Each structure stands twice: as structure tokens, then as C-alpha cells.
Image: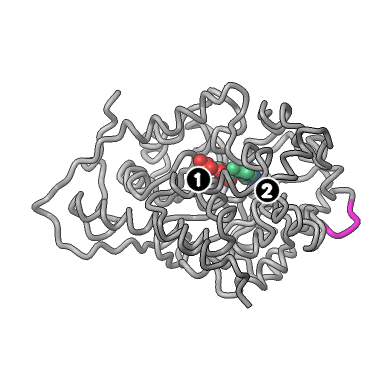
Amino acid sequence: TRPWHADAVERRLARCVTVDDVERLARRRVPGAVFDYVHSGAESEVSLARNRDAFADVELRPTAWDAVGDPDTSTTLLGRPAAAPIVLAPTGYSRLSHHTGERAVAAAAAYAGMPYTLSTYGTTSIGDVAEAAPTGRNWFQFYVMRDRAVTDQHLAEAREHGYEAVMITIDTTVTGLKRKDLRNGFAIPPQLTLRTFADMARHPGWVANILTTEPLRFATFPAGSPYGLWGMSNQHREQRLRPSDVTTIKEQFGGPVVVKGVLSLSDAVRSVDAGADAIVLSNHGGRQLDRSPVPLELLPQVVDAVGDRAEVYLDSGVRSGADVVAALALGARAVLIGRPYLYGLMVGGQRGVDRVLEILTSEMERTMSLVGVSRVDELRPEHVRLRRS
Ligand code: FNR
């Protein structure tokens, strides 16, 4: 049965024209500390702002005489079809954004025909996500743990549940510091101060849902493991990753491996040399090393260096279909989105994520039409110019 407020949520979502509209609604739906956790960047938030500035600086240059109408956003990623060159990025703690969490996101991605990446710090298990999206293209992102038995377990489970690819994130030797989280007392378990209590009290529906669904924990780890939500900290993760880890993991998993968090030409080349099938240029949405390179600005030289040896994806700051088109014209095979789908999730669970994917796809179609291309592989460097360079 549909909850009584479902129609109101549908109406609100239908009125959203852009991802930014969804973000504005999301801000009101969850406790401020939860919204800030998702929305913020690391340290001075310089990278967070630069990611967006870079997209704003892209000029799109139409080739109108080539236009043939009916744009088709479909592509192939890692050799399999996708309805659009958009991958749902791994995000930890999705059940804080909405109690339906990772299940809802994976189901929305499957419905839209786009891959979904479950995070190591997901709050739903590898098996439960596979069950929620049996027809989906599910990928698993993992942080290599010092205790390699845990990594072995993750790889075995991902394979057993039909996950198509694994993604190794290399930019999190330590967790980036988001100042607002400290100021908000955003910690697990939450610090109960008058302020955090008042914040929760303003969102009774959210609190009730959290309390009445399965307990929040890092569900990709076995129940009762020391990696529950409370004990997780930097010291559990392997802080000395080497390219040879990519080679080993690929052999062990027996399927495609994606390396995420590449921010230099040399890391790109070394990842591919080690056997990565795809790399993700990413500064983690400005949440890790502040003042790191902007992925969009790094893209052309990395694409040149990698050639067709691996697919090159990009994330950090994608908020519209025009952003996707810009990244593709500069050579990306696909983009990943993080916060946009979490905002949708906050507003309306799976329906909210559906709406965000719908908005991005329709913006992409319109932009492709106006640029004068009918297929994504027709997007070329001549369709873009970076205005500041
Ligand atoms: C992330 N990201 C992330 N990445 C990763 O590899 N493992 C993880 O567990 C997480 N967790 C996470 C939580 C939250 C709340 C956010 C917003 C992001 C980074 C994510 O995969 C992606 O790189 C960025 O979100 C992309 O930038 P945008 O789309 O958010 O601007």
C-alpha cells in the first residue's frame, strides 16, 4: 500500500525541473546534519567549488549541419549496454538519506538501465542489493582492508551474487575532514547535544523510519564483525595500496576492475598498466584532498595517454545532462554521479532517484540535439572549448 503522502511527493518531484530543484527539496527532508554530511566538501571546500566552476566554463559548440534528430543516449560500458553513460557512484550510509537506502538506489538504476555501485560502507548487504535489483548491472566498490581476509570475502560475495565489476577506490588513505560534520556533532553514534536533539526533533518521520527498519550498520561486513558502524576508522583500511593490488584483485575476482580516485597522469597510466579495465578521474566530489586537480581539467590529457587501453570515466560535480555531454565531448566514456541521486533519495526514495535520472537523461537528449549529434560516440573535442584555457 502506498503511504498517504506518496502523491504529494510525486507532485513535488514532478515540479522539479533540475537536479538543483531536487537538492532544494532534499535540504528540508532530512536532519541538517545528514544533509550537510552529503552536501559538504573537505576542508576549505575549494575543490568542491572548482568542480562546479569547471563545468560552468565549458562552452558547447554545435555542428548544426550534422544534426539528424532523435538523439540516442545509449552506450556500452565494460562491454555491456547501458541506457546512458551514467553510473551511480558508491556512497556510504545511503540509509541515512532515506530508510530504503541502497535497495531503492539499485532498483532505480536497474529501472533506468544504468550501473549501480554499492559501497563497502553501504548500509545494505551485497546479497540484499542483488535481490532488490536482480536485473541490474551491479558493481561493488571496495576499500582494500588491512585484513585481507575481509577483502577476499567481499570479492567472493560480489562474484556469488552476480556483480559485474569491482571498483577499487584509491583516494582514501584517510577520510577527508568535513568541518561541518565536526561542528554538527555528526558522528556515529550521534552526539546527543541540545542542538542535535532539536535537529532530529524537527524530522520525526525520518527518525521513526530509521528506528523501525533494520538497525543501521555497515552491512557489507558480516554481522558481528569488528567493522560494524561504530568501530570503523582509518586504521582498518590498507593505506599502502600498490598497482600490483589491482592485478591480484582482478585475477581473484575474475571480472572487470575499475580504479576510482585517479588524479594524475602517472596514476592513470600505472592503473591501466596494472590491468584496470576502466579508471575514474575523481576527487571524490571534493570530499578528500582539498585543492586537488579538477577531474574535468585533467580529462583530455589522460584520455590521450590511455587511448583505448581502458575506459575513462569522470565524476565530481556532474549536475546536469549538459555536464554529461561536456565530459563526453572531452573524451570520457561515462560519468558517475553521487550527490544528485542521494538528493533524489532524500526526497522520495526510489521515485526520487527515478526522477533525477529522468531529468539528467532528458537534459542530455536536449543538449545532444542542440549540439547536433544523435549518438554519444559522435561527441568530439570540436564540440567543446574550455573558456578559461
Ligand atoms: C561518497 N563517495 C564515495 N566514494 C567511494 O569510493 N566510496 C564511498 O564509500 C563513498 N562515499 C560517499 C558518501 C557520500 C555521502 C558522497 C557524497 C560521496 C564519492 C562518490 O563515489 C563520488 O566520487 C562523488 O560523489 C562524485 O561527486 P558528486 O557527483 O557528488 O559531485
Task: Give the residue type that dot 1 points to.
Answer: Glu
For disc 1, the marked residue is 23
**186 above or below 200?**
above
Classify the position of ligand 1 by quadrant: top left, top right, bottom left or bottom right: top right
**203 above or below 108?**
above
For disc 2, the marked residue is 92
* Of residues 152 and 5, the one drawn nearer to the viewer in this rendering: 5
Specify whether 370 is left or right of 223: left
Which secondary structure dominates the residues rendered in magenta? loop
Query: Where residue 25 appears, x then y in whole percent?
Result: 52, 48
Quadrant where the image shows the N terminus? bottom right
Quadrant where the image shows the C terminus? top left
Q: CA distance from mark 1 to mark 2?
A: 18 Å
Q: Earlier in the sequence, mark 1 or mark 2?
A: 1
Q: Where does the magenta region start and end?
A: 220-225
Specify whether 217 is left or right of 267: right
Task: Give the residue type that dot 2 points to.
Answer: Gly
Specify whether 270 is left or right of 205: left
Query: Where residue 373 appears, x then y in whole percent?
Result: 21, 55
Is label 2 in a helix, a strand or a loop? loop
Q: Is mark 2 within 8 Å of ligand 1?
A: yes
